[in-house]
Amino acid sequence: MRFSAEETVWRQLRGEYAGRWSIWRSDAGRWYATRLTRSLSRAEMDRGMIMTAFGEDVDELRELLVAQDRLAAQPLPTSP
């Protein structure tokens, strides 16, 4: 069974982010990803983390997901 190039890219991206993001492409051709983990806290959202990301193409979506991973890796500031 042969897959289209788009199907191959989708499978690869899904594999990279399995268990963390649900990834799909809309009928309009935009790429979306929604977090599969818990809801974000107000502090996480305030620093730029998002529940759903979208890009005009797979490269733009991947850049957003990489940026989200960087933000998630940063410790939240503790209150004094």
Image (cartoon, grey):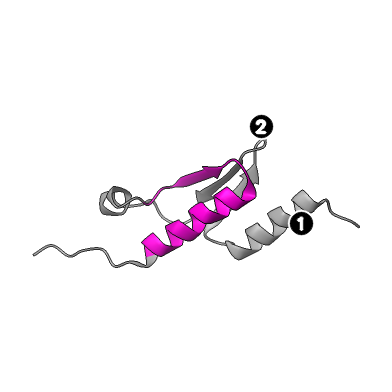
Q: Judge by depth and name the residue closer to the eye, 61 or 76.
A: 61
Closer to the chain start, of discs 2 and 1, is 1
Q: Position of residue 50 (x, y in %)?
A: 41, 48
> Does 39 sit above or below residue 19?
above
- The quadrant of the rendering that contains the N terminus is bottom right
Which numbered tag is attached to residue 66? none
Q: Name the residue at the right extreme.
A: 1
Q: Secondary structure at mark 1?
A: helix
> Does 30 sit above or below residue 37?
above
The span from disc 2 to disc 1 (Cα, nearest Å) is 19 Å
Q: Position of residue 7 (x, y in %)?
A: 76, 51
> Does 43 sit above or below residue 72?
above
Q: Position of residue 8 (x, y in %)?
A: 76, 56
Left or right: where does residue 49 sit relative to residue 75?
A: right
Q: Name the residue at the left extreme.
A: 80
- Which residue is rendered at x = 66% and y = 32% of the image? 28
Q: Residue at label 2?
A: 28
* Among the 4 quarters of the image, the one containing residue 18: bottom right
Report the amino acid beneath label 1: Thr
Q: From which residue to which does the magenta span run?
A: 49-72
Query: Magenta stretch: residue 12 in it?
Result: no
Which numbered tag is attached to residue 8? 1
- Which residue is rendered at x = 56% and y = 50% of the image? 61
Report the amino acid beneath label 2: Ala
- The quadrant of the rendering that contains the C terminus is bottom left
Query: Magenta stretch: residue 60 in it?
Result: yes
Magenta stretch, main secondary structure, is helix
Left or right: where does residue 14 sit relative to residue 54?
A: right
- Which residue is rendered at x = 37% and y = 60% of the image? 71
Q: Secondary structure at mark 2?
A: loop
Q: Position of residue 38 (x, y in %)?
A: 41, 55
